[in-house]
Image (cartoon, rainbow, N blue to C red):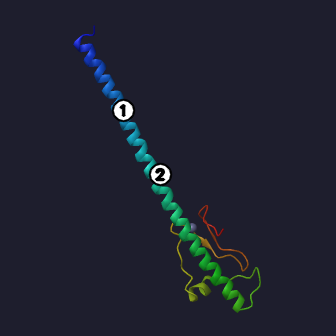
Amino acid sequence: MLSYTTERSARLKHFYAIAGTVLLVAFSLFVYSRWQAKRSAEGHNAYLCVHNLRLIDVSKEAYAYEHGLKAGDLVSTQVLVGLHAWPVVCPSGGTYSIGPVGTPPTCTVSGHKIP
Ligand SMILES: [Zn+2]
């Protein structure tokens, strides 16, 4: 037969085991939800960045077509300012490179590129 103190001690251990498990699960869910939120925010930024890159690309190619430029010719950012395609800013802080005619513009952030 267990003494009162031993029985109480066993219940206390049982309580701590359950409380510890609940806290561990709650903490895991918290970390997971933070990770999911960060991941979806970065996905949204990549989506907006690709939109910007397409705007730059379409403006650059339209200008090149209208002015008879060939593949490899350079278009200045001043031209894109006139077309309201500049300045555009990467939402993740990347830097854009317009690139020559016939080459898609790029962003310095990994994963931000026209598919
Ligand atoms: Zn970007």
Position of residue 95 relative to residue 41, above or below, is below
Foreground pick, 53 / 23: 23
Q: Quadrant of residue 115?
A: bottom right
Label 1, residues with CA under 10 Å away: few <14, some 14-19, many ≥20: few
- Which residue: 64% across, 81% down? 58
Q: Quadrant of residue 12?
A: top left
Residue type at numbered disc 2: Trp
Query: Which of disc 1 and disc 2 is earlier in sequence?
Result: 1
Give the left or right position of residue 54, taking residue 12 as reference: right
Residue 37: give x, y in percent of width and height. 45, 56
Q: Rounded to the nearest whole Å, what is the CA distance between mark 2 and mark 1?
A: 22 Å
Q: Quadrant of ligand 1?
A: bottom right
Asked whether residue 33 appears in the rendered view, the answer is yes
Q: Which residue is mark 1?
A: 20
Residue type at numbered disc 1: Gly
Label 2, residues with CA under 10 Å away: few <14, some 14-19, many ≥20: few
Foreground pick, 48 / 100: 48
Foreground pick, 13 / 91: 13
State the mark number for residue 35.
Answer: 2
Position of residue 24 relative to residue 30, above or below, is above
Label 2, secondary structure: give it: helix
